[in-house]
Amino acid sequence: MAAAPELMIRDSEFVGTFGAARTDITPPPGIYARCWGSSTHDIASGVHKPLLATCAMFADADGNHALTLLALDLSWWSSKQDELELRTAILEGSGLREDELMLHPSHTHSAPRTALEFVNRPGGHLIPQYRAQIKAACIELIAKARARLEPSTLTWRAGRCELAYNRDLTSPDDGRVLCGLNPGAPADDTLLVGRVLDGHGKTRATFVNYACHPISLGGGNTLVSPDYVGALRETVEADTGAAECVFLHGASGNQTPRRSFESDSSAADQNGREVGFSTLSVLASMFPPSTALGFAGVEESGTPLAIWRERVATPGTSIRSRRVTVRLAIADMPSREELKAAIAAAQEDYMVERLTRRLLQRESVGDGTEGDFSFLVWQLGDSFIVGTPAEMHTAFQLELRRRFPGHSIAVLNIVNGYASYLPPRADYAVGPYPTRVAVYAMGSMEVVLGAADLAIRDLLSEG
């Protein structure tokens, strides 16, 4: 008779070496900082909380094969060149390969623009200086993180946070599909938390992977801000010995915080504390490294009791990276010439902003009917990090996690480029905002999902 399967509860783990470093990347006063079409200001009036850049480096036991994540408190890349020039300089300055670096903005909508296309806007003359500041900071952070590599264990556990809501609301007034909180639709409340401990049990870093747009603050806010990410970090770090808390912006294409588009920074702070305390709850539930909970037998009492006890679990040591490229159909959109003419004729600031974004997107993908879409898949032990340049929706991460239930999977939006939204096919029947501005055609998300699935299976087959 075959042995009964072992009953065990365990977390995804990676044992290797880890290093981290952080610096301030708050922009100089007076820089162009308009991210909302509804804004009436071009230059921020002050700073709510500093913008930070954090480098997290994962490596094997010898520190030879390293994967580097740069998490930046920035909004999104306005053009292909906006991101590519910065990432190329970082790769050249650090000696990393393309598949070894994830450049990941938090997607706060209260950070300055970094694209040179905006140098002629008010305060735009400071953009080149700010770009140089970011480049130098990132290269220095990578060197510091590499110098701080030491034996560590990364542990992941999923919890829940109820801050995020679906953001596709049918207007009760005119039936339009609006971008805003929809309490009647389901949202993904998954909160994936990573904890890095050294050999003495000291917390070296935490990771918070959550799918919720950092848009607590809207067009009426005039302060530079990391949005809810700032208070989230402060809350977690106050309880973990000031170890760097790194926000990983999840597949939030269709999710918004409960308090959205507000002008008062207290809304961002409240939202951030909610995610922070939810994170601390998950951290409190974690086992020590290399520890699982296993079924230990029956204890006869008033009723037979199932006894579970801690036992040793073998963590994973694999560290691999895969750069995946798929060919996607480009969505039907106006030509560059048509968009330039529309911008010239536009009378409202919000329309100029909409059309300018569309023009930069069109220039990024070119005038063809198809384009390459590249993304990264990293394996860390029995966990995976999937970073795409798009704003993926929750359907993407929910399905990946369903297909690989024995592995923690962190999905990161806007990694190494910006490709607008990749909505699931079902959304096109409703027509929310992301389907109207997507640069790739309906069905593209499903193509990327299939490619990510295959990449994870290939990595697992390598042992």
Image (cartoon, grey):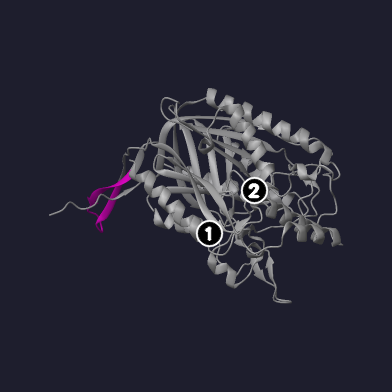
Q: Is residue 300 magenta?
A: yes
* Quadrant that contains the N terminus: bottom left
Q: Where's residue 395, x and y in %?
A: 51, 60
- Residue type pointed to by label 2: Gly
Element carrying mark 2:
helix
Find residue 272 and name its label.
2
* Quadrant that contains the C terminus: top left
Residue nearest the observer in this picture, 292 or 404: 404
User: Mark 2, residues whose alpha carbon is within 10 Å: few (<14), some, or many (≥20)?
Assistant: many
Locate residue 140 relative to residue 192 in the image: left or right. Answer: right
Mark 2, mark 1: which one is toward the viewer?
Answer: 1
Element carrying mark 1:
helix
**Residue receiving disc 1:** 445
Q: Where's residue 402, x and y in %?
A: 42, 57
Q: Is residue 81 magenta?
A: no
Separation (CA) of disc 2 from disc 1: 29 Å
Lower sequence index among marks 2 and 1: 2
Find residue 394 and name its label.
none
